[in-house]
Image: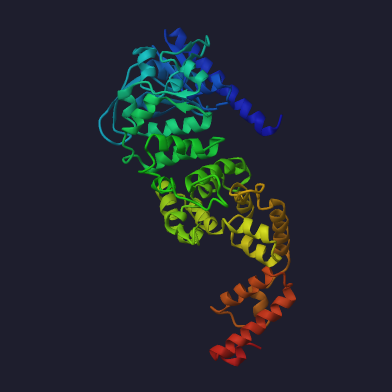
Amino acid sequence: MSGDRAVLQGTDELNRDTARRIARLVDAAGGRVFYVGGFVRDKLLGIDNKDVDIEVHGVEPAALQTILREVGTLLSYGESFGIYSLAGVGIDIAMPRRERKTGTGHRDFEVDVDPFIGTYEAARRRDFTINALMEDVLTGEIVDHFGGRDDLAAGVIRHIDDVTFAEDPLRVLRGAQFAARFGFTIAPETVSLCRTMDLSDLSKERIEEELQKALLKADRPSIFFEMMREMGQLDVWFPELEQLIGLEQDPLFHPEGDVWTHTMEVIDRAAQVRDKCSDPYAFMLLALTHDLGKIVTTEEIKGRIHSYEHEIKGLPLVESFVRRITGEKAVIDYVLNMVPLHMRPNVLAYSKPAVKSTNRMFDAAVCPEDLIYFAMADRPVISGTDQFTGDSDFLFERLDVYKEMMERPHVRGRDLIEAGLEPGEYFGELLDYAHKLRLAGIDRDAALKQVLAYARRNNRKQKRNPDQVK
């Protein structure tokens, strides 16, 4: 067993042992403790879930706090909501509560802790039947008031209560991401209810949390967006994606259909390689947004559909999309860097140009490896032929060449100073020129001679003091 796996297993055992200790003490005080939520759902699905949530019934808050202090160091981060934790233990401990919507914000709820409301009422406030399952920590008894086990077996996401469900519009996105993660369908009555809910007051942070789960945990993230489409809920947070529906492409290169269909296929292929990438989340956003430029560039010319320069002209749309979803500068910068480059790997792999061309492409990318993985996900399909993958072997071979060249000695600022140049603003231009020579495979000594000659020519043009370059 590897060290990481041993740590994880040790943590899991600690969490469960702690839950059982709490349950025994609560049982002695006349109460019961249940595993709740995703922990029970995932256990029944055979999925590991390290997030242990327990709910304590039948004891007063003060009594529970006394019990928890016997077990460990009590941390109360939501006492008014009946929520506790213990230092060094990964368990969320909650008491049953009633909730009543008081406003439009996600925090606008009136909460009453009531440890004696019973399991039915406690479970009824949850979103979906598969998340309302409870398991007695000591006996293993499954409490299922709303048919959650049947829905798990059938692969159905079904809401519990029309009124309480509609109080939190985030549940629209939660339903979509659960469908994507588990490959489930959403019950027709739940789809109908979700169509009536307004998502405009949700915060970007809550939207991003659900989107991340769909993009990073689902084998087919496209299901998330297909469900959002079916529920009529793309327009507020994902309007650019909605505009891809029905947007035609050249069938010679895209026999799969419109830009929406292509994008959904790309994100599903990207999901198969995301764990190899430097930033899986940013990589998936790249896959999601790479063709938004076709919204503003698609036109028919002489009977053929074209989207010339969509990778450049679509950047304002891409930036608007990612800034609406995330505030992470590194993620935004990654996407805006990679979208303009996204077509080049497959084009160059097809034409097999000189090393200088692939070097320039890799040098422009924030992560060259990720650019190749994206090219694999975005592979064009030429009608009437086998799938053209862009020859990823060629691209990785060229990437090795690029990396080897970047490790060679190259012209630096100090080399220019030692050659007699006075430092100044024009050094940036000279070093840029030196870098171009480096990408072309020119060795350091030859490149230095060319840079000095370039500097002399520029000095003559700009009528600089001829003594500045010796």
- Nearest the viewer among 55 and 338 is 338
- Nearest the viewer among 46 and 266 is 266
Residue 277 falls left or right of residue 91 = right
Q: Residue 420: tell me if it is visible.
A: no
Residue 48 at x, y percent in the picture: 58, 26
Residue 445 at x, y percent in the picture: 74, 76
In this view, which residue lies farthest toward the front? Answer: 303
- Nearest the viewer among 237 and 259 is 259
Q: Residue 56: tell me if it is visible.
A: yes
Colour convention: rainbow
Residue 248 at x, y percent in the picture: 47, 50
Q: Which residue is drawn at 69% across and 55% down?
A: 395
Q: Which residue is drawn at 50% across and 43% down?
A: 261
Q: Please identify the quadrant where the N terminus is shown.
A: top right
Q: Residue at x 72, y 55 (%)?
A: 394
Q: Please identify the quadrant where the C terminus is shown.
A: bottom right
Residue 229 at x, y percent in the picture: 41, 38
Q: Which residue is drawn at 55% across and 79% down?
A: 424
Residue 249 falls left or right of residue 112 = right
In this rendering, the count of numbered labels is: 0
Figure check: 91 above or below 272? above
Quarter of the image holding residue 204? top left
Residue 126 falls left or right of residue 265 = left
- Nearest the viewer among 248 and 367 is 248
